[in-house]
């Protein structure tokens, strides 16, 4: 096996779990997230020798673009749900699954751009500059999109029957 393949396989092994989480949050469904990540990794492999710098940033941008394209082509937002791919606390696994499901549903209520900004910024812990680079926009656009997305989430939480009943 050549050096190119070894480096690619090492990258995929090391970063796939985090990238799968990102893909899942972008699509709202684990199966669609897996498909999305597979597409992105196939594209990465084809361009591996030409990618300078950060391949993870390249994959994240590809995930966002593929997710947006998928949403546009379907003409509607995906309706599937699922649980996030990480380790649950065995003492309260049911509550964790419910919270994750609620999170995925809430994220699906946002526009694809808003969802991408929040996922990259808060779940992938990227800086505003890194998010801007991944999405091909300005830092100001990241800030304003984040603000609008968080406002939409707050408005949704304020009208949620669960939120009203606990206050």
Image (cartoon, rainbow, N blue to C red):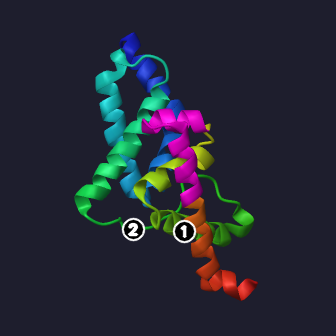
- In the picture provided, is 163 more to the left or to the right than 67? right
Q: Quadrant of residue 41?
A: top left
- Give me the C-alpha separation between circle 1 and circle 2: 10 Å
Question: Relative to 91, is 49 above or below?
Answer: above
Residue at screen point 48% across, 55% down: 115
Q: Position of residue 2 (x, y in %)?
A: 36, 11
Task: Using the image, tell me which numbered label, if any, was put on residue 80.
Answer: 2
- 133 is within the stretch colored magenta: yes
Q: What crowding class fits label 2: few (fewer than 14 Cα within 10 Å), some (14-19), or many (20 or more)?
A: some
Q: Position of residue 100 (x, y in %)?
A: 58, 64
- In the picture provided, is 47 more to the left or to the right than 20? left
Q: How many marks?
A: 2
Residue at screen point 62% across, 48% down: 122
Question: Relative to 148, is 41 above or below?
Answer: above
Position of the C terminus by quadrant: bottom right
- 94 is within the stretch colored magenta: no
Position of the N terminus by quadrant: top left
Q: Which residue is disc 1 drawn over?
A: 101
Give the residues in magenta. 128-148
Q: What crowding class fits label 1: few (fewer than 14 Cα within 10 Å), some (14-19), or many (20 or more)?
A: some
Q: Quadrant of residue 101?
A: bottom right
Does residue 10 show up?
yes
The front one of 77 and 153 is: 153
Q: Position of residue 162 (x, y in %)?
A: 65, 83
SS at mark 1 in the image = helix
Residue at screen point 25% across, 64% down: 75
Q: Position of residue 94 (x, y in %)?
A: 64, 72
The front one of 154 and 102 is: 154
Residue at screen point 39% across, 49% down: 34
């Amino acid at each position: 096996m050549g050096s190119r393949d070894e480096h690619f396989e090492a990258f995929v092994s090391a970063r796939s779990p985090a990238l799968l989480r990102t893909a899942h949050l972008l699509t709202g469904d684990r199966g669609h997230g897996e498909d999305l990540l597979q597409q992105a990794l196939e594209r990465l492999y084809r361009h591996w020798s030409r990618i300078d710098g950060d391949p993870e940033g390249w994959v994240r941008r590809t995930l966002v673009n593929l997710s947006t394209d998928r949403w546009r082509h379907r003409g509607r937002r995906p309706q599937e749900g699922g649980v996030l791919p990480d380790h649950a606390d065995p003492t309260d696994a049911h509550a964790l699954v419910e919270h994750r499901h609620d999170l995925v549903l809430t994220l699906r209520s946002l526009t694809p751009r808003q969802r991408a900004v929040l996922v990259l910024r808060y779940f992938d812990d990227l800086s505003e500059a890194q998010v801007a680079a991944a999405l091909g926009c300005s830092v100001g656009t990241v800030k304003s999109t984040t603000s609008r997305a968080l406002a939409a989430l707050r408005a949704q939480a304020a009208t949620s029957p669960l939120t009203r009943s606990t206050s």
